[in-house]
């Protein structure tokens, strides 16, 4: 079972603020200097570690994080306000979403599926 995902970042505090503001993640606890931890849900923790101290991922980038959100347009505007690189919203048969990049260049896909009923 996957319980945590560590991203190598340039500034863990900046990443913490970005993901808390953009996606409403909550801080689990303050950890060691050079690291930040956020609760994603269902027992999964997203960790941000200074890329110079990380043995798991030596450089920022190289992973895509997918976030299903309630309001794609609102989330897009939030990411733009936070200075993220943000693509256009694409509508598909299953729903819609867009691609973006966080401040460290990690790929994001933000989407919402059509709800049944």
Image (spheres, rainbow, N blue to C red):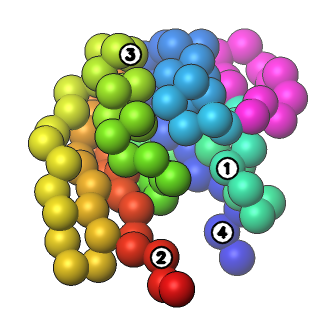
Q: Which residue is at 63% across, 44% downward?
A: 46
Query: Predominant secondary structure in magenta?
Result: loop
* Label ID, residue 40: 1
Q: Which residue position is annotated with label 4?
A: 2
Decide if residue 107 is on the left or right side of residue 65. Answer: left
Decide if residue 42 is on the left or right side of residue 61. Answer: right
Quarter residue 75 falls in = top left
Instruction: State which region is magenta.
Output: 26-36
SS under mark 2? loop
Q: Which residue is at 25% across, 39% downward?
A: 100
Q: Determine if the magenta segment contains residue 105.
A: no
Q: Nearer the viewer, residue 56 or 85?
A: 85
Q: Measure the alpha-carbon separation of dots 1 and 2.
A: 22 Å
SS under mark 4? loop
Q: Which of 31 and 86 is in front in this view?
A: 86
Mark 3 or mark 4, earlier in chain: 4
Q: Is 84 above or below relative to 67?
A: above
Q: Which residue is at 35% across, 15% downward?
A: 81
Q: Which of 107 and 49 is in front in this view?
A: 107
Q: Which residue position is annotated with label 2?
A: 115
Q: Measure the alpha-carbon separation of dots 3 and 4.
A: 29 Å
Q: Which residue position is annotated with label 3?
A: 82
Q: Measure the alpha-carbon separation of dots 2 and 4.
A: 26 Å
């Amino acid at each position: 079972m996957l319980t945590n995902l560590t991203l190598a970042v340039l500034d863990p505090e900046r990443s913490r603020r970005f993901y808390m503001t953009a996606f409403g993640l909550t801080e689990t606890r303050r950890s060691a200097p050079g690291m930040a931890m956020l609760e994603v849900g269902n027992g999964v923790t997203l960790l941000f570690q200074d890329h110079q101290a990380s043995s798991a991922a030596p450089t920022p980038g190289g992973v895509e994080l997918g976030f299903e959100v309630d309001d794609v347009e609102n989330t897009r505007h939030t990411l733009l306000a936070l200075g993220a690189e943000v693509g256009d919203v694409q509508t598909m048969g299953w729903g819609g979403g867009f691609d973006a990049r966080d401040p460290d260049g990690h790929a994001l896909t933000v989407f919402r599926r059509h709800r049944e009923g």
